[in-house]
Amino acid sequence: MKPDIKICGLKTPEAVLRAVERGATHIGFIFFEKSPRNIEPDVAGSLADLVRGRVKVVAVTVDADDETLEEIVALLKPDILQLHGSESPERILHLKALFGLPVMKVFSVRDADDLKKVDAYDGVADSFLFDAKAPKGSELPGGNGVSFDWSLMDSLDDHIDYMLSGGLNKDNVGTAVLMTGARGIDVSSGVESEPGVKDLALLDQFFDAVPDKPMKTAGTGRMM
């Protein structure tokens, strides 16, 4: 069984339709002005309407305030809020109560200590996304095309529901899925011809390269 597949940073009808036709389970729209994938909420809403009901629609924000999120939720009508900033557990609980939507909290990972932060959010966030820490000098918290040591995922409890992100592309997604057994994967820059421009051929090649996720042996945590 293949993992869930989220194509993030979509901006055109062609890319949205191709992603869903190829089997995306989630599509992400980024609301962060510094990103080349930034999109206006009304435009994102129109794109989401093309495939609404066939896929989970995800609103990606970075430390957005309530007013900004209210506009995004009203115009996009997302299924999930993805928080890519320094949002606290208390902030997540507030947003879940305010909007009645599940929250996917993102963590930037470089070493094992970064994963210890998950404990404070376990039972608060509905799911997690693990991305690579941004390279020095980058203003983007994600979408930088860099990966991290996927073996670190072995330290996570099996009950943690997460998507794997960070530098995934057609050449390495197979290894990433087989190493981690991730229930979901997320890609943005890995299917682009240039920052913010999704390439339909690369999308096809990425989907072709996604393997079935391995099963874990009960009680051992080992992949088989």
Image (cartoon, grey):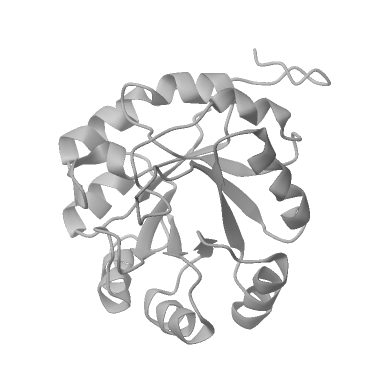
Q: Total number of numbered labels?
A: 0
**Looking at the image, is 26 positioned above or below residue 47?**
above
In the image, 4 versus 197, the foreground residue is 197
Q: Is residue 17 left or right of residue 28?
A: left
**Is residue 169 among the parts visible in the rendering?**
yes
Q: Residue furthest right?
A: 219
In the image, 49 versus 33, the foreground residue is 33
Q: Position of residue 14 (x, y in %)?
A: 17, 53
Q: Is residue 214 left or right of residue 148?
A: right
Q: Quadrant of the C terminus?
A: top right
Q: Quadrant of residue 55?
A: bottom left
Q: Quadrant of residue 33?
A: bottom left
Q: Position of residue 171 (x, y in %)?
A: 32, 21
Q: Quadrant of residue 223?
A: top right
Which residue occupies 21% across, 34% down?
A: 202
Q: Position of residue 194 (x, y in %)?
A: 16, 44
**Looking at the image, is 19 positioned above or below residue 206?**
below
**Is residue 21 among the parts visible in the rendering?**
no
Q: Position of residue 38 (x, y in %)?
A: 28, 65
Which residue occupies 19% across, 59% down?
A: 12
Which residue occupies 57% across, 63% down?
A: 86
Q: Residue furthest front?
A: 137
Q: Residue furthest top?
A: 224
